[in-house]
Amino acid sequence: MSRLPGFLSGVAALFLLVLGSGAGLKAAAPEYIGVAEIADDLGLSLTWTEPNRSVRLSGEWISLDFRAGSKISVLNGIKVYLGQGVLINQEKLYLSRKDWKYSLQPILMPRIFPNPPGYRRVVIDAGHGGNDPGGQNRSLGMSEKDLAMAVGKLIGARLQQEGFEVSYTRTSDTFIPLKTRPALANRAKADIFLSVHFNAASESVRGVETYIYTLQGDPSSSRSKINQDDRKLYPGNASDPWNALLGFYLQSELISETGLADRGLKRARFAVLEDLNSPGVLLELGFISNNQTAQLLRSQQYRNRLADAVVRGVRKYRQTLVRLHQSNP
Ligand SMILES: [Zn+2]
């Protein structure tokens, strides 16, 4: 797209209006790309679904929604969190070029990224363990650490049947410090890292979310302002495009399998993802604090379905990488 002179300062002012606080943007003034330009590049049609607010790009295989002031884009029905809110200026929507490049293009056009990673070795990291129970549902006597181990092993067994080499950061009820987990994965030369968790919150909260490591210079999905850590580049950022691709496939498969609320493909600076030398995600496979979800999670059948959904996501990721390696030997 053409860069509009004087445009960024206007956008910065607008950003302040829309999101309330644009301290990071004022300092960094990142570049933006028009949503209309993305539509042209991809050959998609652009429709305003709400005047001056929301836009949908659509084509044969793609539907992609943006909303002014929102960090949530919706790609083929799945929420994909952007690092920065979408801006509106003179009746046009814009998103940061960084989001276009590292949040959406990896999913829509992974072949533009050089050096596709490997896809053979999977390290499964069952969250918590030992004296750290993680989330709990006391009325049903359930702990996140036990569920994560049980479902993690189901995922591992299925992936092995699919031809992946699988190892674990823990296979028993032991405490492993957060920083040790990516170190173990790196030592095992993981190609794919899956950290398995279940949320806990107030009883009414439900749904599934997948986390990937936050991009350099962006705030995590739970914040709008950037902090000191956000400015640094971490080993996990070397896999930015592949994290997004893997995370999107997993979140899509999990939502279609469970029918639970889609809480989105989100970004966080989780310690288990920070020092990873491979693509990786942290899966939050449901809220054990919600009694209906917790009852489901007690059943072996439901755990199998969850594991199957994760395996389908990883399989899709492998299929894409196989194609990329073939076209990019
Ligand atoms: Zn957890």
Image (cartoon, rainbow, N blue to C red):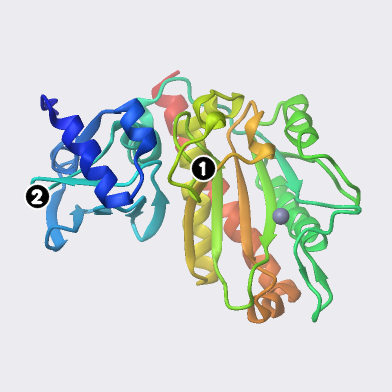
Give the camera-side residue of 12 and 162.
12
Residue at image location 20% in from the left, 31% down from the top? 8
**Where residue 64 is drawn, which disc sits there?**
none
Q: Quadrant of residue 99?
A: top left
Q: Nearer the viewer, mark 2 or mark 1?
A: 2
Name the quarter showing ligand 1: bottom right
Left or right, 30 with respect to 127, comes to: left
Give the camera-side residue of 122 and 57.
57
74 vs 224: above or below: below
Q: Quadrant of the N terminus?
A: top left
Residue 185 pos. (x, y %): 74, 32
Residue at image location 14% in from the left, 25% down from the top? 3
Give the camera-side residue of 242 and 90.
90
318 vs 260: above or below: above
**Where residue 91 is drawn, which disc sits there?**
2
Residue 14 visible, this angle = yes
Give the camera-side residue of 24 and 86.
24
Of all residues shown, which one is farthest toward the top?
Answer: 329
Give the structural element (helix, strand or loop) at label 1: helix
Residue 322 visible, this angle = no
Circle 1 packing at 10 Å, graded few (<14), some (14-19), many (20+), is: many
Residue 246 pos. (x, y %): 51, 42
Residue at image location 43% in from the left, 29% down from the top? 324
Q: Quadrant of the C terminus?
A: top left
Disc 1 CB within 8 Å of nearest ligand 1 atom: no
Q: Earlier in the sequence, mark 2 or mark 1?
A: 2
**Where residue 246 is drawn, which disc sits there?**
1
The amino acid type of the residue labelled 1 equals: Leu
Residue at image location 47% in from the left, 33% down from the top? 215
Left or right, 169 with respect to 75, comes to: right
Residue 94 pos. (x, y %): 21, 41
